[in-house]
Amino acid sequence: MKPTSAFALAAALLLAGTAVLAQIESGERGIAPLDSSSSLEVSGVLVDTRGKSAMEARYAGWREAQRGGWKLLYARMRGISPADAPGIPDSTLDAIVSGIIVEREQISPTRYIAQLGILFDRARAGQLLGVSGQAARSAPMLVIPVLISGGTVTSLEIRNEWQRAWARFRTGNSAIDYVRPSGSGIDPLLLNAAQANRPGRGQWRLLLDLYGAADVIVPEVRLRRLWPGGPAIGDFTARHGPDGEVIARFTLQVPNSASIPKLLDAGVARIDAAYTRALGAGLLASDPSLIIEEPEILAPIEEKADKKDAPQADVSDGDDRSTSAAFTALSLQVDTPNAASVDAAEAVIRGAGGVGSATVTSLAVGGTSVIRIIYSGNVAALRSFLSARGWLLEDLGGVLRMRRAGAALPDADEGVR
């Protein structure tokens, strides 16, 4: 090869590598989703309290919101009226309330008016409610939010308000097990708006296995502004599966563009309700073509040779290994509330017979991590091994989920019409 040609080839490869890096390296991507799997949430609690000072009035308002939030939660869990729900002491409420969300508040020197949300610890509140705190949920659903605004279709390519609305949505009370990508790393290249419209099952199977999901949902919004700063209209569509099956469609409107975040939050809540209704009606069943089937391990076929024709050889070397184990790759979703739980899960998996390797491919301390293992054997044997050591291995729609035995699994606002 001539020196000139070699130099040109090297320059072309360098430019190509730079172009690829330019597509994925940016500080304007990535919004970490809010993890609320360990909380029970009650929203829209209205309070109006007074005090000798603004701080005292606010403290009294939060106390009243805790009492009212508990009655709303109790009534929702038991299917009764909040007026019939029993109260509990403030000291007990302080122990089970994990946070207070200020949705809207007005403060004066002696008065406090607010709309608040109350977060209850799922495990502690579940004991008082008489439930285990573990609710039946759907198979893990990969979320690809698609925004259409100004003639541009985007998903996770750049930060946008629709992705932000899904990231701040609290999924603790939802029956849908959402897998929400942050939009960082290679997410913009793999989970873009174009991928949401591709029907090919091969690529979808690889993506679902990579993100530890069993199915995909595509919530879509077309955002329109009547004039700059004026009323904004959102046309929402809830889609399911790689074929984009429509679950629900609706339209919401806010009086000005400053209220667009409120519009999108209301849209996320209604889409979640639509998916929950579809789950109850059996409309969110996973497409069988998305399931990666494990290869069947066949027993070796013994060939009988004619003793007269086949030469006799002495192969007795003290180690009789006539068969070799076939290995397959499995992805396990593991509840990892802290860093120690990650190490404990890896250690117990590596101790199982037939496990060749165990690698954490997705780390989420305080949420659900994904551990990929190379394993020779069947899932039933692995489940029995983990069960004997205090772990449960569950099959959720083709996705394996591992957790400690006894541990809990992880309408529109005002102005929206």
Image (cartoon, helix red, strand yellow):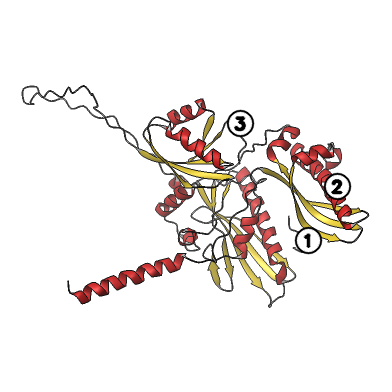
Q: Residue at x 62, y 60 (%)?
A: 164
In this rendering, would 170 be left or right of 210? Answer: right
Q: Which residue matches tag 2?
A: 64
Name the kind of residue labelled 1 in the image: Glu
Q: Residue at x 64, y 38 (%)?
A: 135
How dense is the environment of label 1, judged by Cα within 10 Å: few (below 14), some, or many (20 and up)?
few
- Report the residue that reaches farthest toward the left: 308
Q: Nearer the viewer, mark 2 or mark 1?
A: 2
Q: Which residue matches tag 1?
A: 414
Q: Position of residue 303 (x, y in %)?
A: 18, 27
Name the kind of residue labelled 2 in the image: Glu
Distance from the alpha carbon under mark 1 to that under mark 3 = 40 Å
In this rendering, would 265 be left or right of 3? Answer: right
Distance from the alpha carbon under mark 2 to that under mark 3 = 33 Å
Q: Position of residue 8 (x, y in %)?
A: 26, 75
In this rendering, would 202 be left or right of 221? Answer: left
Q: Where is residue 378, by image quadrant?
A: top left
Judged from the image, the secondary structure of the residue bearing numbered disc 3 is loop
Please tell me which of labels 2 and 1 falls first in the chain.
Answer: 2
Judged from the image, the secondary structure of the residue bearing numbered disc 1 is loop
How dense is the environment of label 3, judged by Cα within 10 Å: few (below 14), some, or many (20 and up)?
few
Name the kind of residue labelled 3 in the image: Gly
Q: Position of residue 81 (x, y in %)?
A: 83, 41
Determine whether label 1 and label 3 are within 8 Å by CB.
no
Q: Quadrant of the C terminus?
A: bottom right
Q: Say whether residue 191 is visible.
A: no
Q: Position of residue 385 (x, y in %)?
A: 46, 27
